[in-house]
Amino acid sequence: MSDTEQFNRSGSSGQQQSGGEGRKTLGSGGKRGDAPGDRGRTSIADGVVEKIAGLAARDVVGVHAMGSGLSRTFGAVRDRVPGGGKSVTRGVKAEVGEVQTALDLEIVVEYGVSIADVARSVRENVVSGVERMTGLEVVEVNIAVSDVKLPDEEEDESEPRLQ
């Protein structure tokens, strides 16, 4: 059984899964003796965790972009479509369990930086941000470095040339 399957099956008293796939539900269900702040449930969707992780990863010096070349290409096209907006979840996949989450990130690093140091900083920033904002325990942050941005390369997401 993978770590992801294991944490999705684990649970603790007072915390229940509800509201569909990919949501974390917190709360005791509103028992009479509970403090007012503990009555009811809070669910967190996978996409919320992905946004938090994506923003936290992009804050790290040395991270040039998120996602593979193909996803960045499609993202660049989507960004130019009115109402498309930038996708902060590009290159981020979260699996949310009842009390834990696991994250997979795909990044492009700047040439000349230590990949090990950037990966460590990304993990620290992502774990800190996700745990602080959601209360979920981050069990793992897997990082795949898909490319290196060379200083003399053109930007992948620059304006297309018209011919």
Image: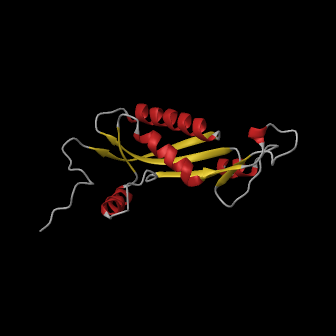
Q: Which residue is drawn at 58% across and 53% down?
A: 46
Q: Where residue 3 sits in the image (x, y, percent)?
A: 66, 47
Which residue is outermost to the right?
Answer: 32
Quarter-wise, where is residue 100 in the image?
Answer: top right
Q: Where residue 141 sits in the image (x, y, percent)?
A: 54, 42
User: Looking at the figure, which quarter contains the C terminus?
Assistant: bottom left
Which residue is outermost to the left?
Answer: 163
Quarter-wise, where is residue 28 in the image?
Answer: top right
Q: Is residue 101 left or right of residue 59?
A: right
Q: Where residue 76 sits in the image (x, y, percent)?
A: 32, 58
Q: Where residue 86 sits in the image (x, y, percent)?
A: 38, 54
Which residue is outermost to the bottom?
Answer: 163
Q: In this view, does 110 lie to the left or right of 10?
A: left
Q: Which residue is drawn at 37% across and 57% down?
A: 85
Could you tell me if residue 143 is visible in this image?
no
Q: In this view, does 5 lie to the left or right of 152?
A: right
Q: Along the line of sight, which residue is nearer the eye, 128 or 113? A: 128
Question: In this figure, what is the number of numbered marks?
Answer: 0
Q: In this view, does 124 lie to the left or right of 160?
A: right
Q: Give the color scheme: rainbow, by chain, secondary structure or one colour.
A: secondary structure
Q: Residue at x 81, y 49 (%)?
A: 29
Could you tell me if residue 125 is visible in this image?
yes
Location of residue 74 with respect to 3 vertically, above or below: below
Location of residue 135 with respect to 16 vertically, above or below: above
Q: Which residue is drawn at 51% across and 32% down?
A: 124
Q: Along the line of sight, which residue is nearer the eye, 97 or 48? A: 48
